[in-house]
Amino acid sequence: MFVDSHAHLDGKQFDSDREQVIARARDAGVRTMVAIGNGDGPPQLDAGVQLADKYPFLYATIGIHPHEARLASDHAYSEMERLARHPKVIAWGEIGLDYYYDHSPRDTQKEVFVRQMELAGTAKLPIVIHCRPSDNSENAWKDCLQLIQEQWAPQGIGGILHCFTGTWTQAKRALDMGFMISFAGNLTFPKAQQIRDAALQVPLDKILIETDCPYLAPLPYRGKRNEPAYVKETARKLGELRGQSMEELGELTSRNFYNFFKISEMDESKVPAR
């Protein structure tokens, strides 16, 4: 059993065979997937919800990605407040800071990040964090973790550091604020030793796995379109690192997911508790 805790299944890369992709994931033992709802940014805010409504084993998030922070508006915030009440929405994200591409001004990214943390707190939804620093710099991590510490940690709700690429020190700081750490296909890349070093130290009950598909396909699929069935390769690598089989790691991270979101493992269509 596996859970893909972060999948951009609404992407145009899946327009020609989305149903087959989802079927392949289920055949591969992926029991649950989370459809990340950023879409192309405002006004498209229900991309994840639309998919979750079609499949009982899909859940959704809502949020404005830092890339599209410049598109945030009062109307977008109101629409997300409405969507946050949907029974299949289990988290707010992905949100955060991206200083690598700087598609939106950094001050705007911070403002939109803080505003969404406020809304997520009101909705009692965990947050899913995207944090990408500029080359050879930890500036985004410094700012992101500081804002979480100041604006989010007092809520006591926690969240997920998605597609973790930082250091153990950064992971530890997030863990202390109630976060889960999610690893993606880049864990398998030859030059990703920093990620593997962190993965060796994160407590087993705080680990999740994801694909971030269609991006970051793991070895041996690197360079191809990623899809949820490939989450098994991340589980395989994590298992190698932690002395467990792929199946054991899959079961463990699945339990972590269901426990964190208070979703029944026996009824994947159950509305999550609030």
Image (tube, helix red, strand yellow):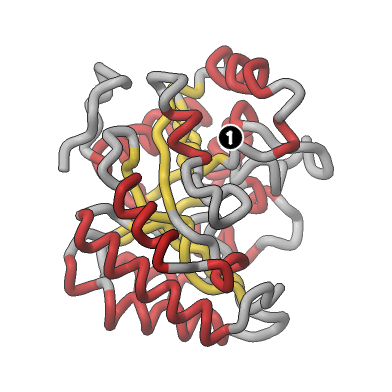
Q: Mark 1 points at which residue?
A: 231
Amino acid residing under circle 1: Val
* Residue sitting at x 34%, y 45%: 83
Q: In which quarter of the image is residue 226?
A: top right
Q: In which quarter of the image is residue 221?
A: top right
Is 217 situated above or below 124? above
Rendered location of residue 56, percent (x, y): 38, 19
* Residue sitting at x 66%, y 23%: 18
Rendered location of residue 250, percent (x, y): 45, 31
How many labels, in total? 1
The quadrant of the rendering that contains the C terminus is top left
Res. 209 in view: no
Rendered location of residue 246, percent (x, y): 52, 30
Is 66 situated above or below 123? below
Res. 150 in view: yes
Rendered location of residue 104, percent (x, y): 63, 76
Left or right, 59 with reference to 262: right
Left or right, 50 with reference to 123: right
How busy is the neighbourhood of tag 1: few (under 14 within 10 Å), some, or many (20 plus)? Answer: many
